């Protein structure tokens, strides 16, 4: 049967639609191990499985055998173990053999999930295989690679030979091997229902795998949005989604995007030449969109509310991080708070310890000791806690008498914790003076546009400066950059603040 293609513009609930299909199938008696739900990350697959288990309490994890990533499926069906997969030790050995330092190029967000290589040589080598193009062609397309063809070929041949001798696989190998052997061996699971989420981000070799799975499934749902395909530089192939045959169903009501932002975003994406046209409605709110010449003007608005700040590149993101620190704003960068949990635990611990009626756990005390100078704040540091009772609670007097604490009780945390870096102290004090609540999740998050995909916030600040490589890419294929900024714009639930590129020409060419 032809696939049902679910096209989900921003905020229209694409994943929710798929989860409803899972629940309907289970309610109608479809056995869970006859449902294949393949997500882009392990986290997304786990969340889908957990929701189904919560809805149908008689089911548990082992009943959902095919809720996973495509990489994970290939790994399972090929009968591989973790010993068969290239790891850090292998890359260290390979680096020594080649005389060239290579990192673990199979860096992933989670086990057998997705991610991109952090080594430029391996990126090119891996992409050529994932896209099924020659290494020479991939090398020529990259253009900015800071090495010669002979060096790249030497590395590619070395990696291939190393894996062959040791019978090892990397993540791309798993997919390639599955595709090659699927027709000859019993590798394809028998499914009543096949569900593929985030299809716009699939690589060409993954599309080959999906089409094999479709041939063994009674009902297929392919969900995605070609307009939100922003990983083409990493090999993603929105063209495969655009050209896919089947019944198209467009989710046409956004629950996130207000009218003004909807109008601006759809005007931008309509300039993309090769796309699937989609009519979708904004939520029943006007919203707000403003353009700024300087980012300082937006910082003045961040005294309250939920904010997401996005940049096109990591260099600009670093500048944003410094800006926020100077202003004492508490924030999260790629989901990591600007004040670490350990520092905050030490600050709260000492503040509580300074109150005579407060007692701390051993773990809390040790965290404080970490930031106390030996023989100034505490005698012999951690050694004084080596015989401490892990189940006991400790007050200031007990620590002074038995565990070498020297700091006067009346000292404030930024005086007592003298091993905490001064830069951090200045920042945290500034944040507290702004009445930032450091004990809750930051209300400001910063990320690249690519890193924020799938995220949202009431207020969004979008910076349009493009790095050199993106600028070069724009003139080769402007549609790719338009998709990137479309994704950035559509993270906003109430207000969008676009900060002009330093190049007015660059800004207008992308947005107008």
Image (cartoon, rainbow, N blue to C red):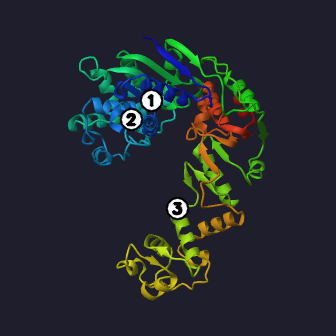
Residue at label 2?
152
- In the rendered image of this protein, does residue 287 appear above or below residue 346? above
Looking at the image, which residue is at 59% across and 45% down? 447
Left or right of 1? Residue 271 is: right
**Which quarter of the figure has residue 310?**
top right
Which residue matches tag 1? 139
**Mark 1 or mark 2: whose residue is earlier in sequence:** 1
| Badge nearest the viewer, 3 or 1 | 3
- Alpha carbon of mark 3 to alpha carbon of mark 1: how far? 43 Å
| Residue 27 spot, x, y in % from top left | 44, 25
Say left or right for 349 vs 37: right
Q: Earlier in the sequence, mark 3 or mark 1?
A: 1
Examine the rendered structure and indicate whether residue 152 appears above or below residue 209: below
Judge by depth and name the residue closer to the eye, 265 or 470: 265
Q: Nearer the viewer, residue 484 or 280?
A: 280
Q: Earlier in the sequence, mark 3 or mark 2?
A: 2
Q: Closer to us: mark 3 or mark 2? A: 3
Q: Position of residue 251 (x, y in %)?
A: 61, 22
- Residue 153 appearing in the image: no
Q: Are marks 1 and 2 in contact (CB under 8 Å)?
A: yes
Q: Tell me the CA gap for discs 1 and 2.
A: 8 Å
The label shown at residue 341 is: 3
Residue beneath the point at 62% across and 33% down: 487
Q: Is residue 460 left or right of residue 115?
A: right
Label 2 residue SS? helix
């Amino acid at each position: 049967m032809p696939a049902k293609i679910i096209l989900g513009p921003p905020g229209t609930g694409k994943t929710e639609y798929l989860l409803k299909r899972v629940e309907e199938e289970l309610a109608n008696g479809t056995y869970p191990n006859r449902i294949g739900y393949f997500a882009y990350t392990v986290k997304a697959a786990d969340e889908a499985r957990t929701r189904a288990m919560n809805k149908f309490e008689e089911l548990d994890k082992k009943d959902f055998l095919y809720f996973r990533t495509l990489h994970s499926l290939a790994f399972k069906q090929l009968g591989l173990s973790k010993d068969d997969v290239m790891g850090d030790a292998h890359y260290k050995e390979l680096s020594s053999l080649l005389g060239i330092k290579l990192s673990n190029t199979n860096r992933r967000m989670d086990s057998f999930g997705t991610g991109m290589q952090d080594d430029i040589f391996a990126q090119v080598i891996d992409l050529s295989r994932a896209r099924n193009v020659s290494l020479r062609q991939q090398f020529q397309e990259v253009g900015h690679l800071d090495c010669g063809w002979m060096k790249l070929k030497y590395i590619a041949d070395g990696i291939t030979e190393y894996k062959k001798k040791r019978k090892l696989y990397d993540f791309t190998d798993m997919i390639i091997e599955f595709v090659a052997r699927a027709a000859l061996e019993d590798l394809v699971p028998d499914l009543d229902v096949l569900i593929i989420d985030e299809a716009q981000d699939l690589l060409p070799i993954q599309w080959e795998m999906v089409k094999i799975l479709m041939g063994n499934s009674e009902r297929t749902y392919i969900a995605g949005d070609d307009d939100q395909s922003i990983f083409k530089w990493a090999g993603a192939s929105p063209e495969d989604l655009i050209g896919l045959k089947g019944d198209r169903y467009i989710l046409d009501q956004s629950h996130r995007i207000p009218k003004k932002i909807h109008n601006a975003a759809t005007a931008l994406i309509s300039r993309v030449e090769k796309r699937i046209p989609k009519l979708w409605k904004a939520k029943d709110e006007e919203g707000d969109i403003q353009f700024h010449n300087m980012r300082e003007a937006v910082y003045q608005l961040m005294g309250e509310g939920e904010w997401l700040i996005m940049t096109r590149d990591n260099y600009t993101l670093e500048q944003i991080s410094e800006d926020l620190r100077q202003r004492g704003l508490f924030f999260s960068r790629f989901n990591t708070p600007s004040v670490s949990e350990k520092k905050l635990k030490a600050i709260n611990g000492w503040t509580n310890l300074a109150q005579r009626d407060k007692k701390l756990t051993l773990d809390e005390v040790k965290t404080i000791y970490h930031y106390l100078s030996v023989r100034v704040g505490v005698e012999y540091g951690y050694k004084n806690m080596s015989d401490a009772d892990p189940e006991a609670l400790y007050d200031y007097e007990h620590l002074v008498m038995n565990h070498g604490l020297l700091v006067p009780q009346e000292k404030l945390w930024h005086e007592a914790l003298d091993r905490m870096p001064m830069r951090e102290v200045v920042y945290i004090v500034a944040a507290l003076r702004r009445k930032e609540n450091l004990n809750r999740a930051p209300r400001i998050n910063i990320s690249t546009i690519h890193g924020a995909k799938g995220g949202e916030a009431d207020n969004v600040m979008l910076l349009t400066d493009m790095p050199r490589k993106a600028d070069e890419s724009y003139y080769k294929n402007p549609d790719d950059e338009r998709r990137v900024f479309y994704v950035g714009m559509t993270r906003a639930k109430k207000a969008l603040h676009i900060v002009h590129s330093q190049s007015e020409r660059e800004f207008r060419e992308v947005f107008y």
